[in-house]
Amino acid sequence: MFSIPLFACQNASPVNDSPEAESELLPASEYPDQVFWGDLHVHSNLSFDSNSFGNQNLGPEAAYRFAMGEEVETSTGQKAKLTRPLDFLMVADHAEYLGFLSALQQDDRTVLGSDLGKRWKGYLDGDEGMGPIMTEYVAMVTGAAPKEVPDRKFNQSIWSNVVDIAERYNQPGKFTAFAGYEWTSMPGGRNLHRVVVFKDGPDKTKTIIPFSALDSDDPEDLWKFLEQYETKTGGSVLAIAHNGNLSGGIMFDDERLDGTPLTQEYAKTRSRWEPVYEVTQVKGDGEAHPLLSPDDEYADFETWDEGDISQTPKPQDLALKKQMLKGEYARSGLKKGLKYAADLGVNPYEFGLMGSTDSHTGLATADDNNFWGKFKDSEQSESRITSKMGGALWSNSKLTASGYTGVWAQTNTREDLFAAIQRREVYATTGPRIKLRIFAGWEFSKNDLEIGDFVKKGYDKGVPMGGVLSPVSGNETPRFIVSAMKDPDGASLERVQIIKAWRDSEGRLNENIYDIAMTENVSGEAEMLAYWRDPDFRKEHHALYYVRVIEVPTKRWTTYDAEKYDVALPSNIPKMTQERAYSSPIWYRPL
């Protein structure tokens, strides 16, 4: 069911003397008033897969320089530059064999002194080449073969260099460079990857070496490491899960990795260390799936039904497939969280939404008209729309030019950006820099859209994205004010929607999509303001709300390629797309 598509829904009436919503209000002069754009998930030649698939030249420094707006030479010898610089970046190279291939290619003595280094160097210098190295790497990371780990001294040296580079490019107030890495767990070929983000500088981050999937592939062990880091250093760290669409159903599972049921302690720990989730990136969009949301006409967006990270196909049986998908997509995970909030008293899946590129070229690009792919062989070329990644993986045409994260903060510093991520005042886009704000409260009215100081009213009378709305006595219903502005260099907006999910009194999980702002102008709108009051609210139901903003149709990157290289676009490859933004949710918890 969809609501009447009005810019301000008319089902509201003034409410007086209502209690204020729960909110960690900042002083009036300290409301986050700027949105900063960036990417916390980019790989350089220090990552095993980036390097083995051809990026042997672009390291972390090139990635930072590119993000800051400099022109760089790509792995295929082309010139690449962002149209607009980013505000922040983290080079999140894989912790497993971090820098090992790069050191091997440079004949590093420490690496060549190990049995693993000697054997892999022999492959590289012989006829076998990279093939057996990749086979051994995958077998060790997935646990199919005994693990051979690099020397601890080597790991410490590489990590220290990663930290030093981030420190060198970090310019508080101008450009933020976070130190971090990717924990690349894939038990049985199922994707449980997390990006680990440190707020701190080298005085703290250099006291550890990255905890990798070679240490453990269980997220609970990663969380223990994060806790030990904070206890030891007094620093701050968090983890961001991603690519649930390739997790084989276990990203938002109903049991722990060891097969035991979820517990209250598990829920507390996961929500503590993983405040946000990467909902969109180059390997598809992970907001919703059409089989799980058949009434949502926009659910089938850049959908990857490609199996898990090892390319194991999904079940053919429809019921089994749906059950697997429920553990893979963000909306389903958020809905499951409402179930556990009621059953356990704690929500393990109370996460905000953000986007990243997961680029393995060192190039953080999410624009369809300036898309540089995932690996070297998916950089711009005449053949990429008809070729496969690595010659045998997924078709390059399936890649999604996505995504970026918008962060609401006061200043462009590690401290402010990290705090915003922790409080979930962030949102995801599939590339466009759409400016989006949502507030929920009990006292908003349509007049709040018409009188100035939208932001101050939002914080004074409600909670922002990522917040929790306190229950109230009586029969009040939540009211929302939303502001969405197009990317100044992008397409206009077609509609603004609120996606609501709730757990009813019988324990059923439900969802509904409400069009709260739509345009009748085929060319779209530059700005949309909307006031909405939930017409179906029940105060005894656990619920959540997030905003989805959808642009008018524009050319997909595959069409730009076809035009640039004057080649025919196969009929099975999409020509157009509708870019979008997803706010972090706002939750309602009943008494």
Image (spheres, grey):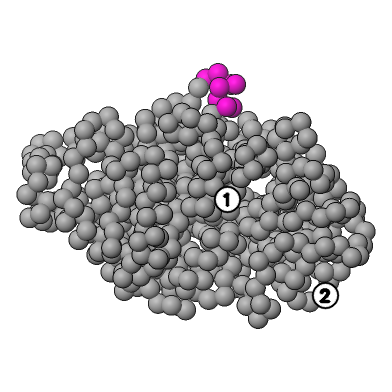
What's drawn in magenta, residue-wise?
A: 316-323
Residue 81, percent from left and from top: 40, 66
Label at residue 504: none
Comparing 494 with 532, the one in front is 532
Residue 80 colored in magenta in the image: no
Q: Is label 2 in a helix, a strand or a loop?
A: loop
- Which amino acid, mark 1? Phe
In the rendered structure, the answer to whether residue 49 lies left or right of residue 512 reads left
Q: Residue furthest bottom?
A: 29
What amino acid type is highlighted by mark number 2?
A: Ile
N-terminal-most mark, 1 or 2: 1
Q: Whole-percent x and y of residue 30?
A: 63, 77
Vertical comparison of 397 with 198: above or below = above
From mark 1 to mark 2, how far is it between C-alphas? 32 Å
Instruction: Name the spot of residue 33 as percent of width and height, x first.
Output: 63, 74
Residue 351's disc is 1
Residue 5 appears in the figure? no
Q: Is residue 336 left or right of residue 156?
A: right
Q: Tell whether position 321 is magenta.
A: yes
Q: Nearer the viewer, mark 1 or mark 2?
A: 1
What residue appears at the point 28 percent right and 63 percent down from the top-left corner?
Answer: 207
Q: Residue at x 64, y 43 (%)?
A: 345
Position of 193 compared to 289: left or right? Answer: left
Q: Which residue is mark 2?
A: 451
Residue 443 appears in the picture as rendered: yes
- The residue furthest top is 317
Magenta stretch, main secondary structure, is helix
Could you classify mark 1 by the number of other residues whose Cα lies within 10 Å: few (under 14), some (14-19), or many (20 or more)?
A: many
- State which quadrant residue 127 falls in: top left
**Judging from the image, what secondary structure is the residue with disc 1 in?**
loop
Q: Nearer the viewer, residue 365 or 289?
A: 289
Q: Is residue 394 left or right of residue 426?
A: left
